[in-house]
Amino acid sequence: MEELRSTEILDKEIQADARKKAERILAKAEADSKNLIASVPARIAQVREEQQAKYGERISAYEREQDASLPLEQERFLVSFIQSAMDDATNRYLESMSEAERLNLALRQMKQFENNLKSKKFNVFVYGFQQELVKKALDKKVDVVSYEATEFNKMIVEDDCGITNKEGVILEAVDKSVRCRFTIPEVVSQLQSRCRAELYGALFDGRLGSR
């Protein structure tokens, strides 16, 4: 009987001890949970600051890059705008001329080569212009063997200079020793190169700043 009571007392002591341990564990877990919950806002704020610093620098770098490239983009746009305006003005001027006037414009440089051209026979290649009109202009100036139609940029490489009227005359010596081009794109190219400042001044009267 005494042994049974001793066993009961021992069981109660074990249970009491286990209960106390469980209570301590629960209390510690509850305290840890409260500490964890309490620390969440601070941790979130810390992560936010870290991300803001990280991406803020990227954004700043992007903004600096954009600020640096903006003047260059503005300059490119302005140059493109001015060139388009010059091309438009040139096209309107050429369209106001007759075909014969444009042919005379294209052939105007022949005068300085007439003596040299008279010493050879030539095949003449024409694009844009009427062959009869070219024949009438050349027959008394050059010894022509044949006239043949061609296309812009086929016989020789040319910049179209943004013009609509792509017309020209190409003289090629029969012995292939000489080739001369008298074309509207060539005239416009020389004009824009030599007189760009004057063209700009006439179009914009200095309103877009110095070019």
Image: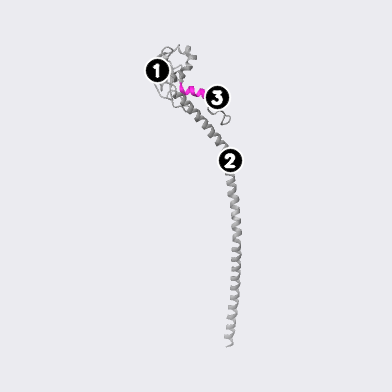
* Label 1 Cα neighbours within 10 Å, binned few <14 / some 14-19 / many ≥20: few
Q: What is the distance, in whole Å, between disc 2 and disc 3 at their CAs?
A: 33 Å
Q: x, y percentage for residue 169?
A: 43, 19
For the residues labelled 2 and 3, say whether their Cβ atoms are less than 8 Å apart: no
Q: x, y percentage for residue 115?
A: 48, 11
Q: x, y percentage for residue 134?
A: 41, 17
Does 124 sit above or below residue 36?
A: above
Residue depicted at x 57% and y 83%: 8
Kindly identify the amino acid type of the residue bearing the numbered disc 2: Asp
Point out the stretch of residues depicted in magenta: 183-195
Q: Which of marks 1 and 3 is nearer the N terminus?
A: 1
Q: Earlier in the sequence, mark 2 or mark 3?
A: 2
Give SS at disc 2.
helix
Residue 126: name its quadrant.
Answer: top left
Q: Mark 2 points at which residue?
A: 67
Give SS at disc 1.
helix
Could you tell me which quadrant the N terminus lies in?
bottom right
Q: Main secondary structure of the magenta part?
A: helix
Front-lying residue, 209 or 132: 209
Does 39 sit above or below residue 58?
A: below
- Of marks 2 and 3, the one in the foreground: 3
Q: Name the residue under label 1.
A: 133
Kindly identify the amino acid type of the residue bearing the numbered disc 3: Glu
Q: Earlier in the sequence, mark 1 or mark 2?
A: 2
Front-lying residue, 164 or 186: 164
- Of marks 1 and 3, the one in the foreground: 3
Kindly identify the amino acid type of the residue bearing the numbered disc 1: Leu
Q: Mark 3 points at which residue?
A: 198
Inspect the magenta stretch and tell me whether residue 186 lies in it: yes
Residue depicted at x 49% and y 23%: 188
Residue 124: name its quadrant.
Answer: top left
Q: What is the distance, in whole Å, between disc 1 and disc 3 at their CAs?
A: 32 Å
